[in-house]
Image (cartoon, rainbow, N blue to C red):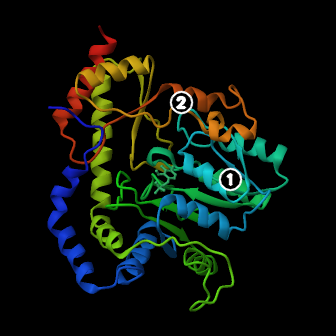
Amino acid sequence: MNIPFFDLSRQYRGIKKEIKTEVARVCDSGRYILGDNVSAIEAEVARYSGARYGVGVASGTDALYLSLMAAGVGRGDKVLTTPFTFVATVSVIEKLGAVPVFADIDSRTFNIDPSAAETCLKRKSKGVKAMIPVHLYGQCADMGPLMRLGRKYGIKVIEDAAQAIGAGYGRKKAGAIGDFGCFSFYPTKNLGAMGDGGMITTNSRKRAELLKKLRGYGANGRYVYDAIGVNSRLDEMQAAVLRVKLRYLDKWADERGANASLYTGLFNKAGLAERVSLPFIATKCRSVYNQFVVKVDKREALRKHMARDGIGTEVYYPVPMHLQKCFEYLGYKRGDFPRSEEAARTVLALPIFQGLKKSELNRIVSSMAGFYNR
Ligand SMILES: Cc1ncc(COP(=O)(O)O)c(C=O)c1O
């Protein structure tokens, strides 16, 4: 039997009845946009994350885009972020006519390094209006020093928490630390819809109201507009699915955490600790393991070997943003962010989804041992 990198059907099997009931209820209600399920999931995700307000939008990408708009970022402004992320973190900056500015990552956590961010701000602080730290793989960036930088330089902090719903940082949770928290409900996320979806959390009523206006064409009343907005709404069907899944989110995150611990034990037992560098979780952080990412050498050969053993793996991400063709115009070159480049060469994501069996974890580690110990 093959072991897929990700298998959503296993999760669905356990909640099929509840999902079908709730989706049927939406069908019967005749209300498909901005109804009761959307208001409820906005309040529930906000409460779950420890933020005051939630604003449902059409995707994680739109959550970032609308947050930047609400932070007043526009043409010619600069936005500081990490080059080691998913493309949407950076493309939304460009879409507003602003300029992405990069600071390298901490090579242990893969998240933006606050001291690199400060060095960058010292050099380029003029015009930097916002910062987007990304909580990669389910672990929060080092938000304490980053928030201090935000205050010191007078810039807004927008958390890209697309991969990190529920992740802990000290006593806080992802999405409730910065000025805005952006979640994605893409199906493979820990809280995944059955289609696209996203949400912004914030502690400011004024910002929540502005975001609601911007997601609905900029309307201030019926067919009256005092801002230029977009159409980006979470729909009732997705909200109903998310409400069911939210009830299981902590349990599923615990399962992912348990899989991560099992991996660690198995790697040590297989004598692979030298060859495979396991995830590093910072003291202040509680990861929700949206991904289980190790660093390896001979990655491409290893992936081929594992594929021959029927095991799916992924690489998040093989090319850092400063080396992508679409961002060539920014003028960066190879060597500018060596830690991101090294991560891009060596990271490998292993299956971690809930429902993965212990025997499957065993097979994954044995396959890797078979490659390195031959
Ligand atoms: C770090 C990060 N940012 C942003 C996004 C964009 O989210 P979406 O796919 O919902 O637009 C994703 C999801 O793929 C992501 O992983």
Q: Position of residue 104 (x, y in %)?
A: 66, 37
Identify the residue at horizontal 16%, vertical 56% (top origin): 13
Query: Counting residues from the N terminus, which is met first, the one under dot 2 or under dot 1?
Result: 1
> Callout 1, which amino acid?
Glu
Q: Toward the viewer: 123 or 7?
A: 7
> Callout 2, which amino acid?
Ala
Identify the residue at horizontal 25%, vertical 50% (top origin): 8
Element carrying mark 1: helix
Identify the residue at horizontal 69%, vertical 67% (top origin): 71
Q: Position of residue 278 (x, y in %)?
A: 41, 30
3D distance between C-alphas at marks 2 and 1? 22 Å
| Residue 256 appearing in the image | yes
Q: Which residue is disc 1 drawn over? A: 94
Count of all numbered marks drawn on residues in the image: 2
- The circle on residue 306 is none
Q: Does 147 sit above or below residue 295? A: below
Identify the residue at horizontal 32%, vertical 45% (top origin): 257
Q: Position of residue 200 (x, y in %)?
A: 52, 67
| Residue 171 appearing in the image | no
Element carrying mark 2: helix
Q: Quarter of the image for the C terminus: give it.
A: top left
Q: Does 77 sit above or below residue 317? A: below
Q: Which residue is disc 2 drawn over? A: 344
